[in-house]
Amino acid sequence: IIAAGLFAGIVVIGLAGYYLARLALVPIQTAWERQQQFVADASHELRTPLAVVKTNAELMLRHPENTVEQESARVTNILREAIRMNKLVSTLLTLARADANQLELQLKPVVINEVIETVVEQFRPLVELKGLELSVSVEPQLEMTADRERLHQLLVILLDNALKYTAPPGRITLTCSKLQNQIGLKVEDTGCGIVPEDLPRVFDRFFRGDKARHRETGGAGLGLSIAQWIVEKHGGKIRVESSPGVGTQFYITLPAKK
Ligand code: ADP
């Protein structure tokens, strides 16, 4: 009986130890793997614009007989890629600082209407230039405790996507209202939509729907992961619904006071 008891005890302790070790080790390993993946993806994203810069500079050096127009086209390519890299590097820095918990929100009372107005002013010409319609419906005098800059950034990401993924004649709708002590934000478009198998991955870092389609739009697949970070850091939630060929809706709820 004693031997059986000892044996059972050893088995129970062994199993408990095994599961505890797994609980402790698995998240560490996953975090490490995620970090490795992040570095690999980031390097990959920087490689393409760097290659364009290098090739154009080499061509300029090798062909001094080029006309001013040809040279100017090459310099334009270099500049475009440099701007893209600059944007990418600052996005990567934001994510790295967020991961290291070094990025704090500057929480202050914010009148959301003012933030929306600024973003809409910035987007309306681009939306109209593309032949789309922009409708905005915001309850008057909506206030919340938030980081104004981050709220602005969140709206820019969502409107920028709506603009990128909607062909004319389409419509982008921005709605904001208060529901008890929550602020509800909705960004809706009548664009290409997202296929159901991509929906769970759109907030993943570096995820892009269709590689070929997005090469021309130029995103690195980081916008929505930053949007999600901003919302969650404010204690809110973000979710997406979409029908391919019909359109996409992003729903956000944020606590009015944090
Ligand atoms: P990016 O736009 O730079 O590719 P995001 O992280 O902002 O990266 O978005 C990830 C992916 O989600 C996009 O590549 C696209 O496939 C999809 N997506 C995001 N917003 C929309 C939208 N409004 N309509 C259709 N697809 C979208």
Image: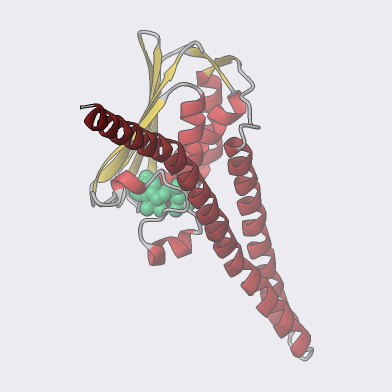
The quarter in which the N terminus is drawn is top left
The colour style of the image is: secondary structure
- Measuring from the top left, give residue 36's x and y in whole percent: 54, 55
Q: Residue 153 sits in which quadrant?
A: top right
Looking at the image, which residue sits at the far top?
180
In this rendering, position of residue 194 left or right of residue 132: left
- Measuring from the top left, give residue 131's x and y in whole percent: 40, 50
Looking at the image, which residue sits at the far left?
1
Residue 69 can be seen in this image: no
Residue 86 can be seen in this image: yes
Total labels: the figure holds 0
- Measuring from the top left, give residue 150's x and y in whole percent: 57, 30
In this rendering, position of residue 235 left or right of residue 64: left
Looking at the image, is 150 positioned above or below residue 123? Answer: above
* Residue at left offset 43%, top offset 20%: 254
Front position in the image: 98 or 37? 37
In this rendering, position of residue 50 left or right of residue 180: right
Front position in the image: 113 or 231? 231
- Measuring from the top left, give residue 152's x and y in whole percent: 55, 31
